[in-house]
Amino acid sequence: MQIVVKPSTTTINKTGSWRTNRPKFLHDKCTACSICPRVCPEGIIYQTKKTNTTGKKYFECDLTYCKGCGLCAIECPFKAVEMGLDEK
Amino acid sequence: MNNINNKQQILEGSRAIALTIKNIRPAVISAYPITPQTHIVEDLAKFKADGQADYEYVRAESEFAAASIVLGASATGVRAYSATSSQGLLLMAEVIYNIAGMRLPIVMTCANRAVSAPINIWNDQQDVMAVRDTGWILLFAENHQEAVNQHVMAFKIAEQLKLPIMINVDGFIMTHTYEPVTIPSAEQIKKYLPDYKPTSGQFLDPANPVTLGALATPAHYMEIRQELHEDLLNSLKVIDSEYKKYNSSVILERSASGAIGSRIDNGFFEYIGPKKPDTILIAMGSVIGTIKNTVGKSNKIGLLKIKCFRPFPADEILKIIKPAKNIAVIDKSISLGAIGTLASEIKTIAQGKTNANISSFIVGLGGRDITKEIIKKIIKQAGKKSDRAIFVGKA
């Protein structure tokens, strides 16, 4: 097995499977303030091109890598992220 | 027996090892001095200071640092060497695992010494047994010449297989005593051991960035460990073939054997004795000399000297021990709460394959002298059944 690897290849590790809680992004509450991508330790929260009912381009996260730490939910001033049990 | 010839020198074991390392020409040496390894690294530092060697000698603030320095050096694709002992080896333990896991071909000498507490600087082999399961190839030398030969072979084997190798020499008994020994010249070594060329793309190079020792998740870790285990087992072939190549190409004195009856000598072990012995004594390291002198000419007792402890040459050893009625395993280490470390290996391979009575004798801990009388006592007791480790501290 290859144990010497090129940089940036750690994305092979789909860390989403480590999660017990998953965030749910409540799009209509999102004001596109950009706090959540700044606090996300995994760097996997991104702004979509879709607009919500208030005309904001809302945020979403990549659940392939989200470990469910919940920082986005705690830091969101508008309670636009809800954490819930990730049942598989 | 060895005859003194004009190539031989009377050298201290440590100096013999240091001169050999100088001629092997590693690029980086890093070590932290610890009794009884000190003379080896003092000599190597002095060769450098006197302009007789061109390696980098990196001083370290601890053994953890020394091991990390040679790890880093080896990761950049150059030949690296270190030496340690006892508490120093224990302090290195984490890095020892990393060196094997990252498949870095480092060669290190361990001057075997007891471990604390109580503090004791004298010889036994408990230190190396603490890193038995790290994935290193573990070789044991009986005398100075064997230690010299094993160091040269070790670099060849390590660099071919990307496996680190530790050469174990009994502290004081080998590091501080003088014996006639032939040191292969730099030219002789170069013929046998070519310059180290790491595999392209497998080492740290700013022009071609790679990651060594990256995270492995549950999806991959197990296969990587299994591969290390299998590569270690497969290294047996190379260890034996390099032993033969070395002995036929590098013109050197073989270690004194005092052979009586049949003698089998390969990269894994040396067996001296009758084909169907009543009793076989098994041991590692310098104590073999004492046993050879004790047993002398015997048509009942065989002596098996293990040179390669990891990987353990199970099939080859089994062939030798199978005809014996009694097997006495003489250990300078013990798995506290169980039996002697080598004894448990022998019991494992004998399981279901021989009916011999296998007993575990513990000798020489913390530098206790191992006398001929102690060996005679062990031979007498070898026929008695015992599943427990038997400490033989006095005759």
Image: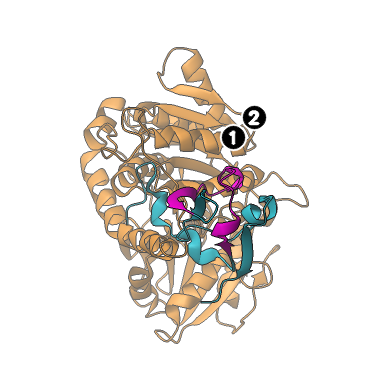
User: Which shade is chain B?
Assistant: orange
Residue range corresponding to the magenta coloring: A23-51
Horizontal placement of B116 versus B196: left or right?
Answer: right
User: Which shade is chain A?
Assistant: cyan
Give the residue displayed 64% in from the left and 29% down from the top: B61
- Residue B344 visible in the shown view: yes
Badge 2 sits on which subunit?
A: B
Q: Which amino acid, mark 2?
A: Glu
Residue underneath mark 1: B65
Question: Residue A24 in the image: x percent, y percent?
Answer: 57, 63
Question: Residue A84 in the image: x percent, y percent?
Answer: 62, 69
Quadrant of image for the C terminus of chain B = bottom right
Residue underneath mark 2: B61
Q: Which amino acid, mark 1?
A: Ala
* Residue B233 highlighted magenta (yes or no): no
Circles 2 and 1 in contact, beta carbons < 8 Å: yes
- Residue B170 visible in the shown view: no
In front of the other: B291 or B70: B70
Other-residue count near label 2 (Cα within 10 Å), few / some / many at <14 / 14–19 / ≥20: few
Helix or strand or loop: what does disc 2 sit on? loop
Q: How far apart are the two marked residues, 2 and 1, measured between alpha carbons?
A: 6 Å
Give the residue displayed 36% in from the left and 78% down from the top: B276
In front of the other: B261 or B340: B340
